[in-house]
Image (cartoon, helix red, strand yellow):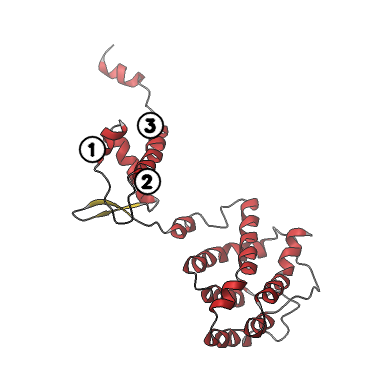
Amino acid sequence: MDNAVFKKNLKAIDTSSLVDKVEQNLVELLQQKKLKVGDGIPKELELAETLGVSRTVIREALLRLRMMGLIESKKKRGAVITSPDLFAIMSKSMNPHILDQDTLKEIFEIRLVLEIGMADFLFQRVKKEDISTLKKIVSKEPEITDHHLFNISHEIAFHGKLYEITGNGTLKKFQKMLLPVFDYVHHSGLLGKPIPFRKFVSHKELVSILESGTPDLFRNAMRQHLENHFARLLD
């Protein structure tokens, strides 16, 4: 058999499973070495010898770690440990048009839980100027706001400010990432038709409670504010 025929009959070796294992082993190895953000990682050759695989496999596994934001390349230092931007990674796949219906509904539910659960942080960190800003936001909304759902611009302005008041930057990023999904689910019909003539707490009432009420009152009011959404999910 000549070389041409021999090569033709060779089957390509699937290294994907090997790269998967090496990727996992690399993460475990870096943890064992107790490396911190900014620390350099071993060279490709050293990693290949330690894990008993080729440098090609190591290179592919390291590429995955770079894509995940776990490592980055520095001039004259090579690859170093970095703190990944989790939401930047998640946002690449957080497209409502490519997510299945169950996932969309669950993401919708996550936002409802977050907004009810932020009460204590709001009351601990809210300032007078925050109340003033919220009052300006709600002043631009329709007068009768307890019998209909707000449009997306009102939602972004009001709820976005609440997330900002919590002082939690990660929570704010998460909220910004969820907004397109929330809007898509609300208008897509996935939750069924809106419940008509159901009174719920307005943004203006929430501001009043935040100014002079308690975390428990706010939690209950936010739950009522979101009642229409819960009714579509649970009824």
Compared to residue 97, the image places residue 122 above or below, namely: below
Q: Is residue 105 left or right of residue 74?
A: right
Compared to residue 118, the image places residue 67 above or below, namely: above
Q: Quadrant location of residue 220?
A: bottom right
Residue at x 57%, y 57% (from the top left corner)? 96
- Asked if labels 1 and 3 touch by Cβ distance under 8 angstroms, the answer is no
State which mark lies toward you, 3 or 1: 1
Q: Is residue 199 left or right of residue 222?
A: right
Along the line of sight, the residue nearer the viewer: 26 or 192 = 26
State which mark lies toward you, 2 or 1: 2
Crowding at dot 1, Cα within 10 Å, few <14 / some 14-19 / many 20+, comes out as some
Q: Quadrant location of residue 214?
A: bottom right
SS under mark 2: helix
Which of the labelled discs sits on residue 15, or is there none? Answer: 3
Task: Determine if residue 29 is in view.
Answer: yes
Quadrant of the rendering where the N terminus is positioned: top left
Mark found first going from the N terminus, 2 or 1: 2
Q: Which amino acid lies under the numbered mark 3 shown in the image of this protein?
A: Thr
State which mark lies toward you, 2 or 3: 2
Which of the labelled discs sits on residue 31, or is there none? Answer: 2
Q: Which amino acid lies under the numbered mark 2 shown in the image of this protein?
A: Gln
Task: Determine if residue 193 is in view.
Answer: no
Which of the labelled discs sits on residue 45, or is there none? Answer: 1
Quadrant of the rendering where the C terminus is positioned: bottom right
Query: Where in the figure is residue 98, as x and y percent of width and height?
Result: 56, 52
Q: Could you tell me how far apart the alpha carbons at marks 2 and 3 are, in whole angstroms?
A: 24 Å
SS under mark 3: loop
Mark found first going from the N terminus, 2 or 3: 3
Residue at x 26%, y 44% (from the top left corner)? 42
Q: Could you tell me how far apart the alpha carbons at marks 3 and 1 are, in whole angstroms?
A: 18 Å
